Amino acid sequence: EYIANEIKEILEPLRKEIKRARFSAITKSEITRAIENPFEIDQRQVESVGARMELDLRIGASFTRLHTLSINLLSQGGYSGNIQSNRNSGICSDSNQGNHPDSHSVIQSGIIQSDIIQSGIIQSGIIQSGIIQSGIYSGRNLENKKNAVISYGSCQIPTLGFVVERALLIEQFVPEPFFTLNILIFKNNIKHLFKWQRGNIFDMNCVKLFLDALLSGSNDNLSQEDNLNQEDNLNQDDKKSSIQSIDDTLKGKITDINVKDTIRYRPLPLRTVD
């Protein structure tokens, strides 16, 4: 909607009546329907997007400046006490601000008088608990962050949180061996792989129990859930050692065959999800 309004502002000197075509898919029928039924541009949505853009810019610039100056001072030993905000005077005071020659100039630089600082953001502990104690800029890392720009964005910060969360899950992951029972049959020089429906089992003795039942020719202990289904995707020879131990005494019975055709169409123009 906001992009449509920008186009409208450019074309207004040439054409007064400008509407927007709305479509959710790049198909002939959808585009034809959108062209035949244009809509008026919703100015409320345009103003909403504009407000969000301005807020992102103002908040991002303010927090980027706040983080950058604060971290640089910490890396130089300027802030070693508790930072507090004085809402009445709009001045940020530090119990140890005299330790650094640039402390006064930073306070007078304008960042302290912004609404963000006056609203008590510093008192909520963003600097002391959100960044410093998290270890990102603590200890020796502070020395490497001198004069560095610590960027903040309303989109990049949540995204960074997702990335960090996923990275921690991967780092904390403990691998565990699992086992499965597959049967590989060669018929007319064609490989046929049969995999059971139980999937991966983390108990090796359980899989051995089913394997022994198959080798002994007794299927009494096998439930209907354990019927083997044929798979087109063949694994590598990771299970070959187990399969080779099965001799001619192993016999099975095919109870059902399902055959279906799958059609994969070529992707539509400009589509990036297919």
Image (cartoon, helix red, strand yellow):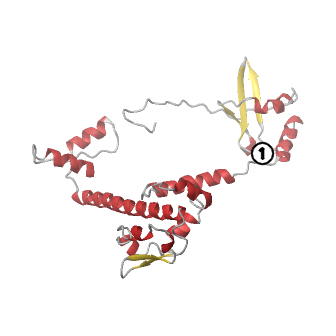
Q: Nearer the viewer, residue 129 or 104?
A: 104
The quadrant holding residue 88 is: bottom left
Asked which quadrant contains residue 44, the reply is bottom left
Residue drawn 36% across the image and 32% down it: 269
**Residue on which the image places disc 1:** 177
Assign a secondary structure to mark 1. Answer: loop
Return the x and y of residue 159 as percentages of the image width and height. Answer: 49, 54
The spot of residue 261 in percent (x, y) is: 54, 29
Residue 236 pos. (x, y %): 72, 29
Label 1 neighbour load within 10 Å: few <14, some 14-19, many 20+: few
Residue depicted at 25% across the width and 41% down the height: 33
Between 101 and 208, which is closer to the camera in this rendering? Answer: 101
Furthest toward the top, the residue is 188
As drawn, 124 above or below 135? below
- Res. 102 in view: yes
| Left or right of residue 180, residue 267 in this image | left
Residue 229, placed above or below residue 170: above
Q: Judge by depth and name the residue closer to the eye, 203 or 184.
A: 203
For badge 1, the amino acid type reads: Pro
Q: Is residue 33 left or right of residue 66?
A: left
Tell me which residue sits at (41%, 61%) in the image: 65
Residue that sits furthest to the bottom in the current view: 88
88 vs 179, left or right, is: left
The one nearer the camera, 109 or 212, is 109
Residue 257 placed where, x, y %? 66, 32
